[in-house]
């Protein structure tokens, strides 16, 4: 999952691109079988594949092409095009029909097919330019995946790479489980912190002055805020966002601020420690600000 999301970022496929694809893709759902037929006819005609053999391998491999078509018009990344071209070509015509540039020819045909459909469906020239650019990014990514697997095949490292892919695949699944458990723990801790916050307010409402009550509540609220930020960070990582170190610097910053509030509440006269805390807040706050700027870029 994460590898596909990383590829998506590498090819600059944004949520806006996916929305563009889905917006026009709903009008292409009923063209699935036509698309498969057109691609198979192109391959058969281009490379003089006999009709009987074309029919046989079409039944065996065209479902990969259809699955890829369904995913693509839905704005999703799919490796089914890899299965189609590798299985269809290498297993049946590894020497006679499969040459490096022919893979590019098939993609050129597919690209022209989609551009024609987009041109017919777009209401304005601006919409055509916008959506065709988004589709091109998705097609470029698919072609990259095919090239990658074909180079592995040619290099003779297929079994080694496949083993690495399996390891990465299951490691990613384990990572998802760990992140899910972290989210569940953070949810439980956040609910507990909110419950304690409400309980603490009601408990001390009639026993402490209003100014102290306000500072106490603010300190407890900061804990809830930190847990909320950690929970949000974990959710974003599960969605494929990059890891942000600033969130942990923010946690340290909040801890320093909370200690300052507690010292203010207790009216302690340890000025040196108070100044040290204040200096820590300023330094960590500046680091936090720098990290936020870098991460936004």
Image (tube, rainbow, N blue to C red):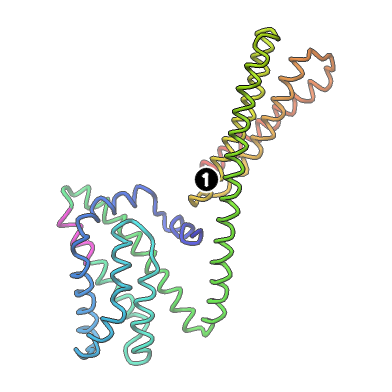
Whether the magenta-drawn stretch holds residue 118 is answered as yes
Disc 1 target residue:
235
Say which quarter of the image contains residue 116: bottom left
Residue 258 lies, in percent from the top left, at 70, 25
| Residue at 29% in and 65% down | 69
Q: Is residue 27 left or right of residue 193?
A: left
What's drawn in magenta, residue-wise?
Answer: 113-121
Is 224 placed above or below 214 here?
Answer: below
251 vs 101, nearest the viewer: 251
| Residue at 55% in and 72% down | 166
Residue 129 lies, in percent from the top left, at 24, 52
Q: Is residue 58 left or right of residue 197?
A: left
| Residue at 47% in and 84% down | 154
- The secondary structure that dominates the magenta segment is helix
Q: Residues within 10 Å of mark 1 (few under 14, many from 20)?
A: some
252 vs 220, nearest the viewer: 220
């Amino acid at each position: 999952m994460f590898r596909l999301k990383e590829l998506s970022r590498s090819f600059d496929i944004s949520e806006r691109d996916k929305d563009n694809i889905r917006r026009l893709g709903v009008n292409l759902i009923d063209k699935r079988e036509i698309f498969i037929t057109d691609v198979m006819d192109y391959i058969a005609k281009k490379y003089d594949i006999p009709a009987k053999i074309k029919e046989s391998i079409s039944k065996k491999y065209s479902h990969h092409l259809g699955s890829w078509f369904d995913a693509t018009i839905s704005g999703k990344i799919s490796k089914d095009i890899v299965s189609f071209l590798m299985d269809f070509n290498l297993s049946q015509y590894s020497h006679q029909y499969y040459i490096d540039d022919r893979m590019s020819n098939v993609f050129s045909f597919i690209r022209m097919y989609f551009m024609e459909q987009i041109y017919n469906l777009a209401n304005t020239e601006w919409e055509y330019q916008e959506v065709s650019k988004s589709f091109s990014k998705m097609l470029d990514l698919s072609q990259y995946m095919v090239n990658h697997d074909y180079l592995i095949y040619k290099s003779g490292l297929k079994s080694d790479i496949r083993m690495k892919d399996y390891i990465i695949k299951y490691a990613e699944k384990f990572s998802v489980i760990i992140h899910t458990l972290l989210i569940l723990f953070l949810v439980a801790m956040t609910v507990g912190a909110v419950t304690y916050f409400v309980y603490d307010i009601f408990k001390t409402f009639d026993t402490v002055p209003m100014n102290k009550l306000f500072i106490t509540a603010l300190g407890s609220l900061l804990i809830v805020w930190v847990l909320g930020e950690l929970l949000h960070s974990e959710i974003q990582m599960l969605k494929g966002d990059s890891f942000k170190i600033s969130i942990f610097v923010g946690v340290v910053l909040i801890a320093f601020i909370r200690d300052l509030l507690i010292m203010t509440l207790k009216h302690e006269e340890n000025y040196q420690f108070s100044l040290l805390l204040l200096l820590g807040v300023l330094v960590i706050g500046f680091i936090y600000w720098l990290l936020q700027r870098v991460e936004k870029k």
